[in-house]
Amino acid sequence: MSMLHRVLGIAALLIPVAAQGQVVDQYFPALGTGAGELSEEPAQIRATQSYQPLGARWGPLSIQADGTETIGYASNVDLLPQVRHSSASIETQGHLGVVAMFEHDNQAHADISVDDTRYPSRSLQNRTTWNASIGATHHFGRDVLGAAFTHLSLVQTPTESGALILVGRIPYNLDDGRVSYLLQTRGRLSFIPELNVQHYYFGNPPVTDSASPPQSQGYRNRVIVNEGFTARYELLKNSHLLFIARGTEIQYEQSNPGYPARNSNGFSVLGGFDSNEASPITFRAVVGYQLRNYSAQLYGRITSPIAEASLRWAPTRLTSAVISVTHGIEDSAFESVVGYTNTQARVTVTHAFSRNIVFGVHGEVSSAAYPATSSALVGTPIYQPAHDQNMYGFGINGTIYLNRHISLTLSYDYSSQSAYLGPMFPVHYIMGGVHFAL
């Protein structure tokens, strides 16, 4: 196991600023995996080990702290196609992580990150976001109990799938708690029951020059309960056949006046394979069927294939490539979007040019497909026409480690994207910064 901050530090350089879709997905584990685990260390970190920060250690505790200050340019900070406001940007990030390793591979960890972004020419879009998480695993012989809790305080932009098209970004919070238990049999079978509860609650968008005040977003608050069961059969060491069954209940705390409630129940069934061997290629894919049934008959039901796949290839200790694909039904977002299917694909390549220089390139495509609602809703504010919302983009980045405590970063990101029912438009980001680490 590695220090969690190292994984997050590299990942932050590889996530494009303009990435859309369901941005919260990056904070949570893959389908059919246990709660409370730590991530594995990327190959590039091992290759540049002499330039990685050491942090501080006291007995079983390891503490890592780092921060980044970046200055750059954004060509469209509103992320809307009509009037495009460009601005310089100043971003300040801070991170603190603590990991405690105990006997028998038991561990506990905590992590907090803060991101403050300022646009001098467009202060309406200034924002401060943060997230914090705690997790732990405890071994009972070969069995493992895992638990994790994550709080996210984020903002929703107009080009995220299923988002409202407003000039100001909408703040929202998400509390996610999950617990799992890995039950090992005496043979090759193992089982992971899991319970996951999420609570979304939204703030109001900022006041703009519009004559009408912003509408309260409380009708979007919801609780999502997922019950999961995973059966694994070990073909080779650390490589398993997977069978996953999940039930989902979504309950909205209030209904928008005059609109039918959007509460729903659903389930998904998936099968696949997880190859986690110590080899240059690791592969994981699960594919299945998903159903979402709404309590209001006017909304009916949505069915779709569901898939989650990733392929990691490390031909050398200096180079790695990761391809990931996800597809499935997403939650209702606002009164004109009941539910929809979302597909995202991403490829990332990183290369350690030398012990202290790391380059990265990435590309991403996504498409949200909104089905038409019942013809009985035509002419009402909640009628949803069939429509696709697309995005594609790419980026390059580089990091120079001056020593264990200071590094320099430079990145460029481009995306062509659209808001709900809107045209495609381009967005450019250029960022350069300095990173400090304990």
Image (cartoon, grey):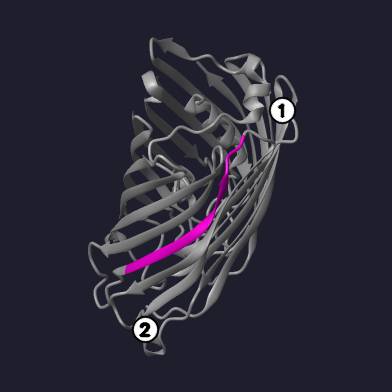
Q: Is 275 one of the magenta-colored residues? A: yes
Q: Residue furthest bottom?
A: 376
Q: What segment carries the magenta color? A: 265-277
In the image, residue 76 above or below residue 313 = below
Left or right, residue 97 beside residue 314? left
Residue at image location 59% in from the left, 32% down from the top: 10
Q: Rounded to the nearest whole Å, what is the CA distance between mark 1 and mark 2?
A: 58 Å
Residue at image location 38% in from the left, 10% down from the top: 59
In the image, residue 261 above or below residue 115 = below
**Residue 369 x %, y %:** 53, 71
Crowding around mark 2 (Cα neighbors within 10 Å: few <14, some 14 to 19, many 20+) is few
Left or right, residue 423 beside residue 164? right
Q: Secondary structure at mark 1?
A: loop
In the image, residue 290 above or below residue 42 = below
Label 1 or label 2, whichever lies nearer to me, is 1
- Please report whichever mark, 1 or 2, sits nearer to the chain's N-terminal start: 1
Residue under label 1: 317
Nearest the viewer among 225 and 237 is: 237
**Residue 204 x %, y %:** 32, 55
Left or right, residue 162 beside residue 149? right
Residue at image location 61% in from the left, 29% down from the top: 433
Residue 380, label in figure: 2
Residue 421, label in figure: none
Residue type for callout 2: Thr
Q: Residue furthest front?
A: 187
Residue type for callout 1: Arg
Tell whether label 2 touches label 1 (CB within 8 Å).
no
